[in-house]
Amino acid sequence: MLKHIGRHGDRKVAILFREVPGEDHMCLVIYPDTLPTHIHNSIMGTLESAPGQAATNLSEVLHRNLLPDGRPQLEALHKEGMIKKVPTAQIIVTPTLQSSVKLDELNKIIREMESGEQALKRLQDIDKNSGYVDPAQKRKAEAEYKRSQEKTQNSTPVPALDASQNSALDDQSIAVNLLAQAKRMEVDARGMINEAARMKKDAQRLFPSVDAGAPLENRPTKVTEPSKRGRPAKASKEQAEPTNAVQ
C-alpha cells in the first residue's frame, strides 16, 4: 500500500500535511484525479518514489521536486488553488489491504510512537523489576529530586560581577555577591547532609551492628566455619572402654 494516500468520502486524496500547524484536527490534501495530466504524473511520481514513501509528510518532498515546467511542485499546487483543508476525521487511510483507520486516529498513534521512547523504557524497567521499582533507584531518584527542588526554591542565580569601563565595583556589590554564593553553598550543604543521613540509615538496615566511625580493617568480621558433612566417626574401642592401670 502507498503511503500518503487516503479517501475523502468516495474521492481519492493525497495527504500533503497530516496536521495543519495550530489546527491538529485539520489536514491539507489534494485530489489527484482532478489534476491536469502533466501535474498529476509528476506529483504521483514523487509520491511513489523512495524519498516520497520515506517522508513523514508528502509536502517535504514536493517542496524539493519540480514540475516539468520547472516550478516547485508544492508551490505550484498552492498557487493553482489545488490544496484543500479537510477535517482529519473525514479522511480514511488504509495502511494495509486488511485495515483502515481515520486520519485523526492515525495521527494520535504516530504522536504516541514518536514520544513513546521514554514510556517504553519505563515499561521495560517495570517489567525487569517484576512490576516494582528497584528500591535503591527509587531512593536515589527521590534524593536527587529533593535536592533539585531545594536549589530551585532557595537559591537564586548569582549575578555576574561586572564593572563598567568608567566605574569600579563597590563594596556593596561585592558583599551582595558573596552573600548569594554563601546561601547557595548552604543549600548544597543541606542537601549533602540529608543524603549522608539517608546513606547511614541504609547501612544500618544492611548490617545493624556496623560502626560508622570504625575503620574497615578494625571492624569485627564474623567467620562461620563450614560444617563437615557425612556421618560422625565411631569412637575406638580403647576410647569407649576405660582401661585399668596396673600398679
Image (cartoon, helix red, strand yellow):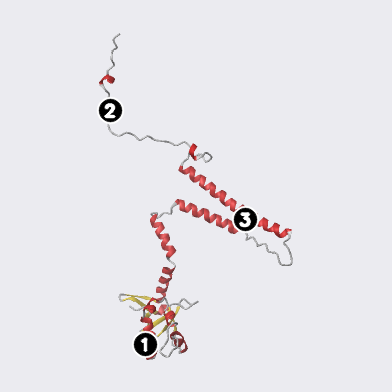
Q: Name the residue at 49% across, 53% down.
A: 140
**What amino acid is labelled 1 in the image?**
Asn
Mark 1, secondary structure of its residue? helix
- Residue sitting nearer the eye, 100 or 170: 170
User: Mark 2 sits on what residue?
Assistant: 233
Q: CA distance from mark 3 to mark 2?
A: 72 Å
The kind of residue on which mark 3 rests is Arg
Q: Which mark is residue 162?
A: none
Question: Residue sitting at 41 percent across and 63 percent down?
Answer: 120
Q: Quadrant of residue 16?
A: bottom left
The CA span between labels 1 and 3 is: 67 Å
Residue 161 image offset from top left, x and y in percent: 67, 62
The residue labelled by disc 1 is: 41
Please tell me how crowded label 1 is: few (under 14), some (14-19), or many (20+) other residues with Cα within 10 Å.
Answer: some
Asked whether the beta carbons under mark 3 and mark 2 sit within 8 Å of each other, the answer is no
Q: Tell me residue 103's x, y (percent).
A: 40, 76
In the image, farthest residue toward the front:
165
Horizontal and vertical percent for residue 169? 72, 61
Let me know if residue 12 appears in the view.
no
Which quadrant: the C terminus? top left
- Gap in Å between the C-alphas at discs 1 and 2? 98 Å
Residue under numbered circle 3: 184
Vertical side of 32 occupied by 220: above or below: above
Residue type, mark 2 in image: Ala
